[in-house]
Amino acid sequence: MRSVVTGGAGFLGSHLCDALLQRGDEVLCLDNLITGNSDNVAHLLGNRRFRFLHHDVTEYIFIDGPVDNVLHFASPASPMDYLKLPIQTLKVGSLGTHKALGLAKAKGARFLLASTSEVDASRNRAFLALARPSALWVPREPTLSVWIGSSR
């Protein structure tokens, strides 16, 4: 199997790269290192089945050869990152997902979209109060909590 992991140098993404390599996959790790850290995958650089590509997933993703899985884990993943990087966070969630889906479609690959817990606004009242106090009125409806942050 050949797997592409976006956000592969992040906390979860790097552990996913480890697990995929352990099961025998070839892994292509894409990360622009805005919040990810190359130290998280440094131990994998000598593995012949691992390749790190410094790439922003909001740009076109070209991967030569077959791809079996696209695992989209790219996203700033903490409330403080959202506050510091609001535009980049929205871009990776929209354009990045679009580009990763395009790669999966072009390659006939399976696709997995990961999200952060902050997508559930009902559990993140403290973050919402910090980001925008007027957002506290948001009801616990999934359709509204899917991306309350997009109005920032």
Image (cartoon, grey):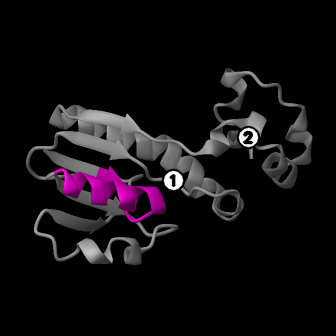
Classed neighbour count for the residue bearing mark 2: other residues with Cα under 10 Å, few (<14), some (14–19), many (≥20): few
Q: Main secondary structure of the magenta part?
A: helix
Amino acid at dot 2: Ser
Task: Assign a secondary structure to mark 1.
Answer: loop
Q: Which residues are magenta?
A: 5-23
Q: Is residue 5 above or below residue 101?
A: below
> Residue beneath label 2, please?
151
Residue occupying the point 43% across, 49% down: 73
Q: CA distance from mark 2 to mark 1?
A: 17 Å
Q: Residue 98: tell me if it is visible.
A: yes
- Residue 32 as seen in the image, left or right of residue 67: right
Q: Please state, as top left, top right, bottom left or bottom right, where the N terminus lies in the image.
A: top left
> Residue beneath label 1, please?
75
Residue occupying the point 50% across, 68% down: 34
Q: Is residue 13 magenta?
A: yes
- Residue 37 as seen in the image, left or right of residue 67: right
Task: Assign a secondary structure to mark 2.
Answer: helix
Q: Position of residue 141 (x, y in %)?
A: 74, 21
Q: Is residue 15 magenta?
A: yes
Nearer the observer, 53 or 11: 11
Q: Point out the frontmost of discs 2 and 1.
A: 1
